[in-house]
Amino acid sequence: MPLTRTQARDEILQKVKQVADGLSDFVVIYDSTRQDIPDENSDPLPTWARVVVQHTQGQQSSLSNLSNKRRYTKRGLLTIQLFTPTGDGLQKSDQLVEQFEAAVRNVSTPNGVWFRNVRSSEVGEDGPWFQTNILAEFEYDQVG
């Protein structure tokens, strides 16, 4: 089913929310919101993620039909910047990375956002947290 940009973004973020809702003491900061990052002096130190959906490409994918409608394919990148407290040998980070990767690997959303090339990369320490980035390319169709 062809999607609007907003519908596609909502379906992508729903995949992240499904994992985050099952976690305790986990904060998600969504792009373009005015949420503050967790306080690095809080005890216990929370685990958190910053989530960004970026559209990067788009192209016409079909000729027009009898109604003069064309299909356009939109592509982009889902980035989950995961921050876990340092000091556990990356056990918490590895566990969460696997959960978020599994949520978008080889799946599509109900209305046709497909995820590809799911991967992660350890970035390193950022204050009291260890940062790992999870990346997934996405694709969906629009008609117009």
Image (cartoon, rainbow, N blue to C red):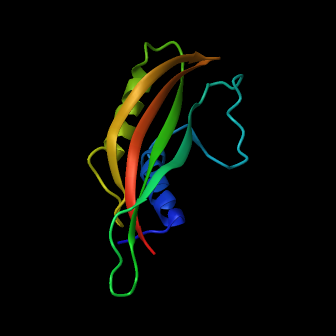
Judged from this view, the residue extending furthest toward the front is 63
In this rendering, position of residue 31 left or right of residue 118: right
The answer to which of 28 and 23 lies nearer the viewer is 28
Q: Residue at x 73, y 47 (%)?
A: 34
The answer to which of 79 and 24 lies nearer the viewer is 79
The answer to which of 127 and 25 lies nearer the viewer is 127
Q: Residue at x 39, y 32 (%)?
A: 97
- Quarter occupied by residue 62: bottom left
The image position of residue 48, as x and y in percent, is 57, 34
Q: Against 25, is 55 above or below?
A: below
The image position of residue 69, as x and y in percent, is 40, 79
- Quarter occupied by residue 73: bottom left
Task: Residue 92: tell me if it is visible.
Answer: no
Q: Against 7, is 101 above or below?
A: above
Instruction: Count numbered badges in the picture.
Output: 0
Q: Residue at x 33, y 72 (%)?
A: 63
In this rendering, position of residue 71 left or right of residue 82: left
User: Which quarter of the rendering shows the N terminus?
Assistant: bottom left
Judged from this view, the residue extending furthest toward the left is 106
The image position of residue 46, as x and y in percent, is 59, 30
Q: Residue at x 49, y 39 (%)?
A: 79
Task: Residue 32: tell me if it is visible.
Answer: yes
The image position of residue 50, as x and y in percent, is 58, 38
User: Which quarter of the rendering shows the C terminus?
Assistant: bottom left
Q: Against 106, is 135 above or below?
A: above
